[in-house]
Amino acid sequence: MNIAIVGSTGAVGQELRQLLHERSFPVTGVRFFSSPRSAGKQVDFGGTSVTVEALPEDGNLGAELVFSSAGGSVAKAHARAWAEHGALVVDNTSAWRMDPNTPLVVPEVNADAIDTHAGIIANPNCSTILALMALAPLHRAFGLTRATVATYQAVSGAGAKGLDELTRMTRAALDGTPAEPEVFEHSVAFNLFSHDSDVGEDGYNVEERKLLLESRKILGVPDLAVSATCVRVPTYRAHAEAIHAAFERPVSDDEARAVLASAPGVTLVDDRAGNRFPMPLDASGQDNVLVGRIREDASLPGGIALFLAGDQIRKGAALNAVQIAEAWLERGRPGGR
């Protein structure tokens, strides 16, 4: 099929190009779009050089499938037009996630929601995807009622510019040279800080609110209790999360471990004797989410505590989007206008 990537030169766009080739996605033709500043640039796709184009004003991308990763404002303004020209749009921005008529999908969790799309399928926020890779199988087994989540989010969450800023600020700090942050509000070198998204009147920032609202929508549990604290840390890629979860009945660590051991897209890294558990360095470049530190929650009888790490650019963004498209094909291309 003919495929288009909007935002093809960013960190997620680059990963999308690589994954489509790696996974032998059925590509007949490709078109790569980006900002006018990047138009004319040559990018690689499976060993072939492709010219990046500026977005056409008429909304016709000449594609049956569009991966959208150029920012929420672009997706909000143009995704419906792309769909009206015959494409399924898999949108990796926040623009359509909470739209009641747009399915929000993690294929391992709610692939059946794909069938209800009306031209656009939303890719969840990275932290939500990674959390639900562990929480959804536990929810199916035991009935999740509450989760407290602390995230340790890599600079890759801010794209290629975030990666560059960590390198620049770290070099400056090591050299003793003053340097001002440009991408983040605070210095990310040898530092960590509350996720730099807007804080609401309730004290929760946008990233924390996404974890709550998106988890409720994906799991289909509108009253699910989720409290998140999202923190930016000086790692390049792969987010980590500490999760404390409660269920409809008491759950032992052995029960939780058995469920997670067979969960799709999850790799157990839970070596107590060797003191080896999930780490961002190990998760980087991996498709699966690493889950470990599984133990009964000492502060919540019957609850479970765990720790995970997952590649934010891969499973937290590009891979999940490609898996949505693969599931759509496997299900016979359902939905549409």
Image (cartoon, grey):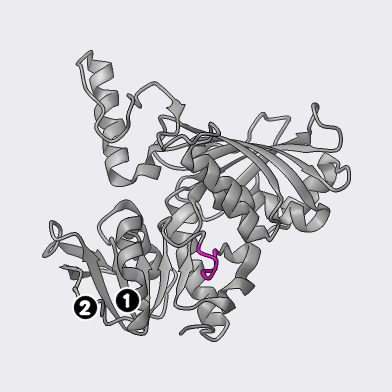
Mark 1 secondary-structure assignment:
helix
Marking on residue 58: 2
303 or 166, nearer to the observer: 303
The span from disc 1 to disc 2 (Cα, nearest Å) is: 8 Å
Q: Which residue is mark 1?
A: 81
Where residue 73 sits, quadrant-wise, is bottom left
What range is drawn magenta here? 99-104
Q: Residue at x 47, y 73 (%)?
A: 325
Residue 31 at x, y percent in the picture:
25, 74
Q: Check residue 103 for magenta coloring.
A: yes
Q: Residue at x 72, y 31 (%)?
A: 272
80 or 215, nearer to the observer: 80
Query: Is 42 on the left or on the right of 324, as rendered?
Result: left
Where, quadrant-wise, is the N terminus in this rendering? bottom left
Query: Is 73 on the left or on the right of 222, as rendered?
Result: left
Q: Is residue 270 visible?
A: no
Q: Is residue 328 above or below residue 259?
A: below
Name which of mark 1 and mark 2 comes first in the sequence: 2
What type is the residue that disc 1 sits on?
Ala
Q: Is residue 301 above or below residue 238?
A: above
Q: Is residue 162 above or below residue 48?
A: above
Q: Residue at x 62, y 64 (%)?
A: 108
The secondary structure making up most of the magenta span is: loop
Residue 218 at x, y percent in the picture:
62, 60
